[in-house]
Image (cartoon, rainbow, N blue to C red):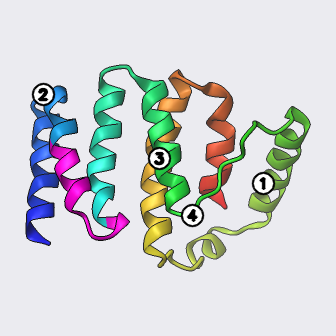
Amino acid sequence: DLSLKLYSLYAEAEYCNGRFHDISQVAAGVFKHAKIYQDKLRAYAILIKALGAQYKLQNAMNMGFEVLSQLGVRQQSSLPDTSIVLRDIIKLKLSLQELTGAELLNYKEMKDNNMIAAMSFLQLLLIYSLFAMPEYFLTITFQMLH
C-alpha cells in the first residue's frame, strides 16, 4: 500500500533529521493501518535505529528480539552455558576450515523473505549487543550463521 510506504519513508526522514520524538507517532500510523506484519518491518527497523541513536540500547534490543520472534526466529530465554558456546565455536571453526572459497560461494541464496528481514534485524542487534548486552554477541552471531 502506497500510504504505508510513504509513512515509513516519513519516519525514516524524521530519523535522518534527528527528530526521534516524532518517529513513534509516525510508526504508530503504520502499525495501525498495516494489513500484514511485513508491512510494519520498515517502521520497526527505524524505531530500533532511533532507540539506538538515543542510547536506549536495551529498549532497542528488546524491540528487536520481539520482531525476530514475530518473524519466526526463536530466541533462547536464557543464555547458553559457556561450554556450549565454546563447543559451537570449535564446531564452526572446523566446518569453515573444510570449506573452499568456491564451496562457500556456491551456497544457496536465501529466498525466505522473513529470514531475509530477520537478518537485517539480527545485524542491528549484533551492533547494539556489543554495547548493551555483550553476552548476546556470540549467540546472535551464531544465529546469523545458521
Disc 2 from disc 4: Cα separation:
31 Å
The C terminus lies in quadrant: bottom right
Q: Callout 1: few (<14), some (14-19), or many (20+) C-alpha neighbours within 10 Å?
A: few
| Magenta span dominant secondary structure | helix
Query: Viewed as shown, does residue 137 lie left or right of 60?
Result: right
Image coords of residue 79 (percent x, y): 76, 36
Q: Callout 3: few (<14), some (14-19), or many (20+) C-alpha neighbours within 10 Å?
A: some
Task: Give the structural element (helix, strand or loop) at label 4.
Answer: loop
Is the Cβ of the residue at disc 3 closer than 8 Å to that at disc 2? no
Frontmost of labels 1 and 4 is 4
Label 4 is placed on what type of residue?
Answer: Gly
Disc 3 from disc 4: Cα separation:
16 Å
Q: Callout 4: few (<14), some (14-19), or many (20+) C-alpha neighbours within 10 Å?
A: few
Query: Viewed as shown, does residue 123 lie left or right of 144?
Result: left
Per the rendering, the mark at residue 92 is 1
| Residue shown at 17% from the left, 39% from the top | 25
- Viewer-proximal residue, 114 or 3? 3
Provide the residue span drawn in magenta. 26-38
| Pointer 2 or 4: first along the chain | 2
Label 2 is placed on what type of residue?
Answer: Arg
Is the Cβ of the residue at disc 2 closer than 8 Å to that at disc 4? no
Image coords of residue 13 (percent x, y): 10, 42
Q: Image height check: is 124 above or below 19?
A: below
Q: Which residue is mark 2?
A: 19
Q: Which residue is mark 4?
A: 72
| Residue shown at 80% from the left, 61% from the top | 95
- Viewer-proximal residue, 51 or 128? 51
Q: Which residue is mark 3?
A: 123
